[in-house]
């Protein structure tokens, strides 16, 4: 999932707006997936 989004960032690299939005989306996804993993481990 994260790999897919990183590929999108590479494609959008020429557009600074797309790049910043993509990096924010990747950060959110990364934090969300970490939170889900923590819930699975501690749950």
Image (tube, helix red, strand yellow):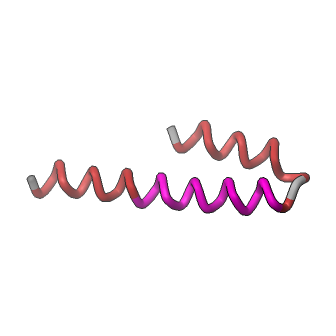
Q: Position of residue 43 (x, y in %)?
A: 9, 53
Image-based side of 27 in relation to 17, left or right: left
Q: Main secondary structure of the magenta part?
A: helix
- Relative to 42, does residue 9 appear above or below in the rendering? above
Image-based side of 9 in relation to 2, left or right: right
Foreground residue, 5 or 17? 17
Residue occupying image coordinates x 54% and y 61%: 27
Q: Position of residue 26 (x, y in %)?
A: 57, 54
Residue occupying image coordinates x 90% and y 52%: 14
Q: What residue span does the magenta drawing correspond to? A: 17-31
Quadrant for residue 17, please give it: bottom right
Quadrant for residue 35, please give it: bottom left
Residue occupying image coordinates x 78% and y 46%: 10
Q: Position of residue 24 (x, y in %)?
A: 61, 62
Residue occupying image coordinates x 61% and y 37%: 4
Count of numbered badges drawn on the protein: 0
- Relative to 27, does residue 11 appear above or below in the rendering? above
Q: Position of residue 36 (x, y in %)?
A: 28, 51
């Amino acid at each position: 999932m994260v790999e897919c989004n990183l590929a999108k960032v590479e494609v959008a690299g020429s557009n600074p707006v797309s790049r910043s939005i993509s990096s924010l989306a990747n950060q959110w996804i990364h934090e969300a997936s970490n939170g889900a993993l923590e819930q699975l481990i501690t749950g």
